[in-house]
Image: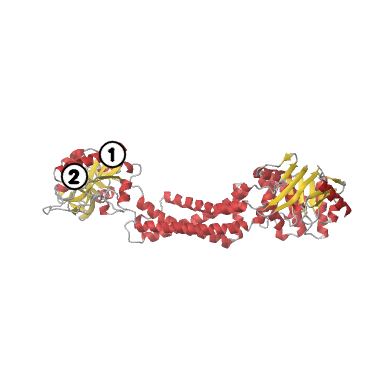
Amino acid sequence: MIGYYLDLARRSLRRNVALTVLMILAIAFGVGASMTTLTVMHVLGSDPLPGKSQHVYAVQLEPRQARGYTPGEQPPWQMTRFDSEALWKAKKADRQAFMTGGNAALEPQRAGLSPFFVEGRWTTADFFPMFRVPFLAGGPWSEQDDLSSARVAVIAKSLAEKLFGTVDAVGKTIRTEKHELRIVGVIDAWTPTPHFYDLSTGSYGVTELLYVPFSTSIELKLDRSGSMNCWGDHDGDSTALNAPCDWLQMWVELDSPAKADAYRDYLVAYSTEQRKAGRFQRPPNVRLRDVMEWLEYRKVVDQDAKLQMYVALGFLIVCLVNTVGLLLTKFLRRSSEIGVRRALGASKRSIFMQLLIEAGSIGVIGGLLGLGLAYLGLWAVRQMPADYAELARLDSEMLLTTFALAIASSLLAGLLPAWRACQITPAIQLKSH
Amino acid sequence: MLKMKDVTKVYRTAMVETHALRELSIEVREGEFVAVTGPSGSGKTTFLNIAGLLEEHTGGQYTLDGVDVKGLGDRDRSKLRNEKIGFVFQSFNLIPDLNLFDNVDVPLRYRGFARGDRKARIEKALERVGLASRMRHYPAELSGGQQQRVAIARAIAGDPKLLLADEPTGNLDSAMAREVMQLLEELNAQGTVVVIVTHDPEIAARTQRNIHIVDGVATDLDRGTSLVKTPATVKKIEEVRAS
């Protein structure tokens, strides 16, 4: 019967083209606007470590001086070098890494290639397995390399191709600040979105091409990037071990909630100990937030984008209410046909299905048009001066969502009119025809 | 075939109770051609709607081809209606967007016949009413008489046992009316039970029996016997005879 109902839907939709076009446009505009904003939200708020984000935590401590202390306030969102190194050495988590953004001038040995700057990350070995960084060749450096400030590096595929014309660059060396670094690994294209582990260097579209052990970056005095907050005297060297400045991001991997609780206790104990030693002046104030909590806390999702999404969803509801009205008019105008069909053996359920399939057909056409409008809307978003703009594209998940939204919307809009229509008393219609 | 015993129909609103049928008892047997007559508002249409399972009766018993219809759900009533009953309406009630073939196809679709079977039945039914050559035409392209013949083809395509016709000649001129009546008589001769609701005494005269309904009570005029038992009904019958 589905084929029959589809054929009846086709005939019905062709019967009143203007009304049909109006309903399709209502669904299309509602879906188009909603999908544009939902896609932006999807990009902004997506899980950058799917399947693992609940086990990876950002660490926060409170190392600032007593002056200006307000009970209940949040600790700084970055860490001091002293605390980062102490927690890293303590190895209380399953994995731990601290890091900072940086940049380095590379001096290519390849003929015809001038020196150029690349963005990089100075970190520790666990960074790679903890964040599931995909390797094309070689692998991460070792913990021993961290301890010994080894002259090693991991580079991105695009940099390997630029410098050597191949991704098979393991064992080759790169030269920066007159020092040579041996390449131990080449990673595939990897752009976590959002750039969760260091939001101070940008939330979206950040591509780091060079990874160097943190200790090596200190020894070689490689430039760092990102924000820094100091609250005391640091004798001109804000990156020194004891400098009262927060500028590093610390992440740990804890495979179970129990381990997370134990690590939180450890951070409190560490803070208490540091306070006793006189380094910390405020009461212990620690936070351990998993990736999604961290993104929420740092308000990564733009408030304007959220507002736009609510407005678009509101617009979709208005479109749906209009479609309900139009469908109701359309179906009830066919009361006599419905009466005849009932007299000839159609059950209420058959009529309901027939009309719902007609509403669904409007949804499919509206969805296709809405998809086109969503592409147009996302193109407009990409013209905006926002750091996430370039990422505003429909992926397969959002493509499916578009159709699901269109069909669900039209079915929802069709429910009431179809139900009302199938309640029509055939006897009255047959007599009054 | 069709047996109603003490059937009542009451329409209730918040303020009013209207008794459309009062202990109506009618029996139509296999092979009969029956006319149901009566003044406007007497309950003829209510009887037809209940007989055709388009409305539920309030009280009494209604058996259609051996099936007690009281308490049947919408799905079962629709199935029974589709299988046992063919309808012919005064205003034809063809679906204007569908050509003749597709109009006749409607009840067969709900019956679930296979495509080939449907096609054969539609062609046979349209041939039966003399319109096989126009099966791709639309209702608006036909005269009133032709439209009613299509409606009859639609009613008989599924081989129902009972044909219910509500003023089938009401919108036709006398020549076309005769043509339609002749068709119904032929169908009856082939074994289909035909029940016609009509105002037209000429039409009623052509049937085998005439059941007269007044104020929701039935009298079998031809046999001169009441099919109902209450004293009020007996009085009514006498009034009708006197008139």
Judged from this view, the residue extending furthest toward the left is: A235
| Nearer to me, B115 or A225 | A225
| Residue drawn at the location 75% of the way across and 39% of the way down | B66
The circle on residue A261 is 1
Residue B146 found in image quarter = bottom right
Residue A382 found in image quarter = bottom left
- Give x and y (percent) for residue B48: 75, 50
Same chain for mark 1 and mark 2? The answer is yes
| Nearer to me, B210 or B174 | B210
Looking at the picture, which amino acid does disc 1 mark? Asp
- Tag 1, which chain? A
User: Is mark 1 in CB contact (under 8 Å) with mark 2?
Assistant: no
Q: Can residue B225 be seen in this view?
A: yes
- Give x and y (percent) for residue A239: 16, 50
**Relative to A131, A358 lies left or right:** right
Looking at the picture, which amino acid does disc 2 mark? Asp
| Residue drawn at the location 54% of the way across and 55% of the way down | A362
The circle on residue A83 is 2
- Give x and y (percent) for residue A155: 24, 47
Q: Is mark 2 on a helix, strand or loop?
A: helix
